Amino acid sequence: MKKNKPEASRIKSAGRFWRDLPIGSKMRFVMLFTLLVIFASNLILYSQINYLIRRMNSVYSSNVNLSELSDSIDRVQEDLYRYLEVRDYESLSDFFREEENYRRLYQSLSEQVGDNPSLVLEKNIRNMSANFLKYADDAVSAKRGMNVSAYRENYEKAEKLYRFIVDDIEDLNEIQFQNNAANYQTLQKALQYMEFTSILTQAVVVLVSILLVIAITRDIVAPLRDLAHTASRIGEGNLDLQVAPVDSNDEIGIVTRTFNDMVTSIKSYVVQVRESAEKQQEMKEQELMMQNHLKEAQLRFLQAQINPHFLYNSLNAGVQLAEMEDDEKTAVFLEKMADFFRYNVRKGKEDATIAQELEMVDNYIYILNVRFAGEIYFEKQVNPRLLDCSVPGMILQPIVENAVNHGIRDMLGEGKIFLTIDQKDNKIAITVADNGKGMTSEQIATVLAHSKVAHDDESTGVGLDNVISRLVIYFDVQPEEMVAIESEGPGKGTAVTLYLPIRRMD
């Protein structure tokens, strides 16, 4: 009994050592031991099976070589005949290539002398092949030398040897096939026995390994399963649960004790986190509301920049026209003016179609030509499929006005304005071009940088800068993403292009 106490103590110490061992070390030990057992058994079985397979693969290699030899001499004979018939360079090249290949193949045959029929046939084939190639080469040489009788004589000799060689190859192939078939059956039986042994051995090894893994990892997986189950319950909101303590100092024991402490601490933070989240949500909603109000205010501010000087001066021109012309023209002019300002006030606060924007531009050009006696040439080219597309109101007329005031005004020749609206890369491309003063690269950069430009007293007050500002706010993009300004320099005109998303009016 006294002798059993130290032994029991050592077993207890070993068990304690295993429980306190880190999980990584335990898993590495289990995996390494299992892999070593499986690897050792597989290595032995693999070497035996691989040896049998190599022997089986080599059984019919002699028949394969004879088949290749037979195919090669057939190609030599065919290429020789074709060259002697047509005498072209391609046939001669094929003959020499196949001749070299056949020479390499027949030289692998045995030269030994003995009573074995296979050896006798191999030696005969080897000797006849050498003579066959000699007669074939002589026939080719005679053909190239235009010696008809010589090449025919050599070809007949070569053809005669060719037939003997083919017959001997068939006889040798049949003898070797019979020998190889007997060897193959013997190896096949041995391989079947080895396969059965392999399957049985693998089944035993896998079964033992599974039992060993289950036995060793049981004390690792069970605490983790309890921990995961408790964590799942706590994740559902039940903070009154705790994991049963684990009597070990490995990672599972440490995590279990720490987990229980964390559950207790989480209870005191839940209320604070909820209150903080509610406050942050309220602040975020207020911030979004402020941003929306700011954008709305910016839009209304930009849309309200209409200079009354243009209205007054245009109405004065209408009065002067009434004095000089008849009532019908005056009525048309005043109607265009009324439509222009009615659209300016109404559509400055809402979206419009491209068709409505074009009507606005036509009215504007008509008013200017009345004031300046038809000095402005205006041409437009519009894709009719885009007329019902929705765009922010008051974006075309300010660009045309900008082309008039800063492009063609005060120029000596005829001022021309070209308006083009078409679809490009799934966007609406609106281009307003003039033949006027042009712009420098610095001026283009200033406009695209969203710099403020003073408006002329004769303008409507909604300039190019106003349009760019509204588009930036409306579509929430940078100016260079939807506005392009091109000019070859002073005196060479300017083209302003807008790239807008395609949106149909509801």
Image (cartoon, rainbow, N blue to C red):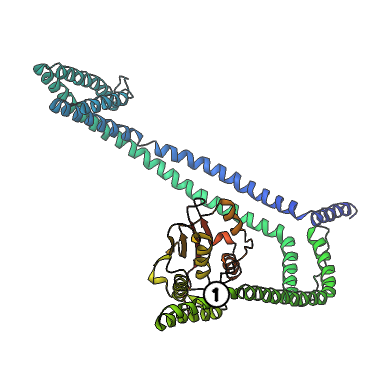
Q: Write down the quadrant of residue 248 in the picture.
A: bottom right
Task: Please state which amino acid type lies under the numbered disc 1.
Answer: Asn
On screen, residue 258 versus residue 398, left or right, reads right
Q: Is residue 358 above or below residue 10?
A: below
Q: Position of residue 139 (x, y in %)?
A: 16, 19
**Image point (66%, 75%), residue name:** 297
Q: Write down the quadrant of residue 166 in the picture.
A: top left
Quarter of the image with the N terminus in it: bottom right
**Image point (71%, 59%), residue name:** 217
**Image point (41%, 83%), residue name:** 327
Q: Position of residue 145 (x, y in %)?
A: 15, 16
- 254 or 146: nearer the eye? 146
On screen, residue 58 versus residue 486, left or right, reads left
Is any atom of residue 119 visible in this view? no
On screen, residue 27 versus residue 156, left or right, reads right
Mark 1 surroundings within 10 Å by alpha-carbon count, few (fewer than 14), some (14 through 19), many (20 or more): some
- 498 or 369: nearer the eye? 369
Mark 1 lies on residue: 313
- 244 or 176: nearer the eye? 244
Q: Position of residue 465 (x, y in %)?
A: 59, 65
- 203 or 16: nearer the eye? 16
- Please give the count of numbered marks on the rendered protein: 1
Q: Position of residue 6 (x, y in %)?
A: 88, 52
The secondary structure type at the circle numbered 1 is: helix
Residue at the farthest right position? 2
**Image point (26%, 30%), residue name:** 72
